[in-house]
Structure formats: structure tokens, C-alpha cells
Image (spheres, rainbow, N blue to C red):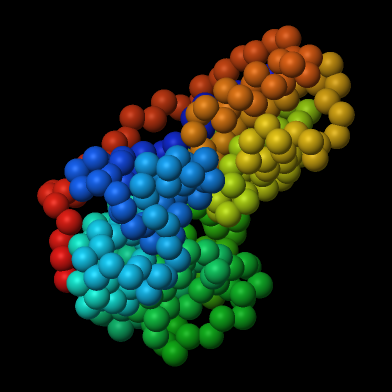
Amino acid sequence: MRVVVAKPRGFCAGVERAIEIVERALEMYGPPIYVRHAIVHNKRVVDSLREKGAVFVEELDEIENPEARVIFSAHGVSPAVIDEAKKRGFHIVDAVCPLVTKVHNEVRHYSEMGYTIILVGHRDHVEVIGTKGEAPESVVVVESVNEALSIHVPDPEKVAYVTQTTLSVDDTKEIVTTLEKRFPKITKPSKLDICYATQNRQDAVKKLAEISDVIFIVGSPESSNSNRLVEVAKSCGVKDAYLIEDTDGLGNVGRLERDMTVGISSGASTPEVIIEELVSRLKDLGATTFEEFSLKEESTKFPFPHSFEFSTG
């Protein structure tokens, strides 16, 4: 059995930054540090931070301490959540990925200009919920080409679009093309909102699909970008493409034959140690050849907030 591991994979700059913000906060202030929503969509990461003293909540009213220190996750939150935290007197810091913040800024900008903003994304995803919250009366979420074909707006001359950062590049282009045909004057972002890491991982999986009989994408079921990698692999003809959280996921997979080529990649919130565990397990199952191919090197680093001091409401 041949095992080929794609690169780039795993942590992106936004994920690394968010995790480090929580770790630094724990070092500076000691536990508990509260985090609204999973800081990133990975159980291993969340459990590790919880063991260090992070307390994860879904809603701010779960926090009883009026002087609590609260971190917002990499996926972003709406202004209403920030306002609530300030009213409660919490000490807060924003660990939102800068690329998500860029989309929030675009929504505010277009809303102030009186535009209807079409947000291409999955309406139940936490990132989309936070982005829509920037201008809930002006934002319309579109998930598919069919929705793009049927959407109605007050003024077709004043329409803009933005996208969730973790979508499939190919699917998004199809939806955007539909929107551009329906609204010829639609305003687009200066740069595609889909993040560099999402696109790089999708491009790498496309190459991986050319040589693989089966592909494992390591990531959480809640991870949008991980799910999109599975979709990309299948769209490239790899019928046996699976999303697994860790080596336990191999139990739900059919027999791996010795003459197979097994491809591996991972979502942007998956720690490298899980990839190492998977490779080791495949060795136990008979893999004899191990390779890594690198499609593109990533060097992006996002700066920390200008001051790491927590602000208070």
C-alpha cells in the first residue's frame, strides 16, 4: 500500500493565531478564560485548551462571572454579540480570522451604501451567522445555484456579493457566475473572499485525486473547509473519499488493499499530530511506501491585535 500525503494541509494562519491567543490569555491571566463557540472546529484542539483552563460556551448568558475574560472564536460574531459582551462588562478579545473580518468590513461598507448584500455560504454555519449579523436587514444568504436563480432584491442596480471564506472554489464560482448574469451591475469584492488556505488545500486535493484510489480528509464534521475537501475529491472522480476525525474513523471504511494508493489531506483546523497517527496506523495495516508532495508553500502569518490587553465594556 502506497500512502501519499498532500501539502499544504492542516493549520492555516488564522487557526494558529486563534489558538495562540487562547494559550497566551491563559498564561497571562490564568484560568478560567471563556471562549464563545469552539475556537476552531477540532475536538482535539478544544479538548487540549479545555484541559489548560479554557471554558467553552455557546452563549454569553452561560457565563456567570461579570468580570470574565471572553474570547470570540476564529469564525467571527455579530455586532450584537459584541454589544452584549460589553453590556455585561466582560473583558473581551477578538480572535476572529482577519480574512473573516475582511468580509465583515465589506458587508458594513455595502450596507452603508444602501446595497442588498448577497452572502454566498451555508446559512447555519457560525461564520455566516456572524457575517449576516453585520447588517441583518440588508444581507440575503444564498447556498446554491437554484437559490441564486430565484432570489429577488429591492433594487437590481444596487447589489453586492460576498462569500463565506471556507467554501468550495468551484461551486462558489458557479453561484457567482449565476449572480453576475442575473445582476449585470453586481458589485464584487476586490479579491475573492475564499481564503488562501482553503483554495490551496482544495488545489492540492485535486492533484492528490489524480493518483489516489482512496482519499482520507482528516477533519471535524463541523468543519466547512474539511467537508469541502471531501466534495472536491469526489468531484475529481475519487469515489472512496472519506472525512474522518482521527484513526478511529478507519473503522467505518472498507477494506484497504495492498495495491492501493491512499491519499491524505486535512482541514485547516486539524493538528499535524493526527496526520502522524493516521500514517502510523496505515503502516500497521500494511502500507509500505510513504510520500509527501508539496503543491505550494505557505508563509502567511497574521499579526496579533495591536494590544493584547483585553478590552472591557
**Residue 47 seen in the figure:** yes
Q: Position of residue 224 (x, y in %)?
A: 56, 53
Q: Quadrant of residue 237?
A: top right
Q: Quadrant of residue 80?
A: bottom left
**Residue 183 seen in the figure:** no
Q: Position of residue 271 (x, y in %)?
A: 49, 34
Question: Residue furthest toward the bottom?
Answer: 154
Judging depth in this view, the residue of 53 and 115 nearest the camera is 53
What residue lies at 31% left-to-right and 53% top-to-bottom? 32
Q: Is residue 181 above or below residue 225?
A: below
Q: Quadrant of residue 205?
A: top right
What residue lies at 16% left-to-right and 66% top-to-bottom? 312
Q: How many marks?
A: 0
Side of 313 relative to 127 (left or right): left
Side of 89 relative to 20 (left or right): left
Quarter of the figure with the N terminus: top right
Q: Position of residue 134 (x, y in %)?
A: 33, 74
What residue lies at 75% left-to-right and 21% top-to-bottom? 261
What residue lies at 73% left-to-right and 25% top-to-bottom? 262
